Amino acid sequence: MEGIEGDASVGGAARYSLKPTRINNEDILFCVDVDPESLVEMKTAGVTRLDSIKQGILLFVNCKLSINPDHRFAFATLAKSASWLRKEFSSDVEASIAAVRALSATTVSSGQADLTNLFRMAAHEAKKSLAQNRILRVILIYCRSSMRPHHTFDVNLKSFTMDVIYLHDKPAPGNSPQAVYDALVEALEHVSEYEGYIHESGNGLPRTLCRFMSMLLCHPQQRCPQDDCDIPKALAKKPADSGNTEGSVVVSISQ
């Protein structure tokens, strides 16, 4: 808080004023992993990770534009490295739908993903966004359970924010999702200007991805640290109390 002033006319209570802060419109670059692991089937029969990702992106775009119609979106894919799918940032929903429909997985594994080009693309576009009083955010959706991403991007000045959603298999002798997750955290912390969030799931439930997408609706300039983020909250029935015959519900924090 700034500008603390005493005000004797109100019983000596202090009066506070906050410095106005501009919240910039966002340019959001979705980068979707199109490795064959994106075609792993979810627990919903006939629905792959990529199908769920497409649904989640469209949910995000529609919700984000309902909050502020001036946000814009562009799209890229990640195989061996990142490449543009739709380079022009647009707030047109139909343009986003067309880009999402064009997403398709590769038939051959690309092995270890190099994020260097993604970061270069984002840094270049961030300069354009800044010139228009906007900020740029990258949302990376990654699907490889044993291939750690790497990069050789040297950050002189952090100019964009990065969020990650990591969908993976359950830990097993043939994979290493924890090592992959750690590498994604390192990459996020290496480049993010504002607080970046990372969410992971190995449960194969489409609704989990939709929940993650909903949590990423929060604007980077208005975020608390992810460790302090206590949403969503789970509703659980309170254990029966012999001294209380009325049913009651308490809110508990999901771990």
Image (cartoon, helix red, strand yellow):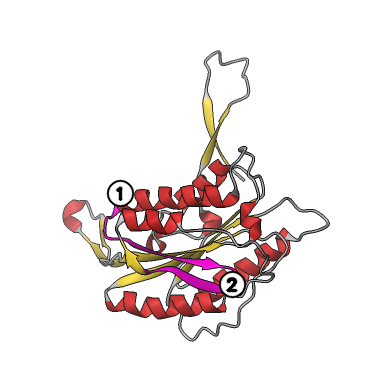
- Magenta-colored stretch includes residue 84: yes
- Among all residues in the image, which is located at the extreme top? 245
Q: Which residue is mark 2?
A: 187
| Residue 230 appears in the picture as rendered | no
| Residue 119 appears in the picture as rendered | yes
The amino acid marked with disc number 2 is Ala
Q: Position of residue 253 (x, y in %)?
A: 56, 42
- Among all residues in the image, which is located at the extreme front? 107
Circle 1 Cα neighbour tier, 10 Å, few/some/many (<14 / 14–19 / ≥20): few
In the rendered image, which quarter contains the N terminus? bottom left
- Magenta-colored stretch includes residue 42: no
Q: Position of residue 143 (x, y in %)?
A: 62, 58
**Label 2 residue SS:** helix
Figure quadrant of residue 237:
top right
Position of 184 compared to 128: left or right? right
Give the answer, above or below, for where 242 lies relative to 132: above
Which secondary structure dominates the residues rendered in magenta? strand
Q: Position of residue 99 (x, y in %)?
A: 41, 59
The amino acid marked with disc number 1 is Ser
- Give the magenta part as a residue range: 67-87
The label on residue 11 is none
Q: In the image, what residue occupies the spot 47% across and 47% down?
A: 55
- Distance from disc 2 to disc 1, alpha carbons, whole Å, reads 30 Å
Q: Position of residue 147 (x, y in %)?
A: 70, 66
The label on residue 66 is 1
Give the answer, above or below, for where 119 lies relative to 250: below
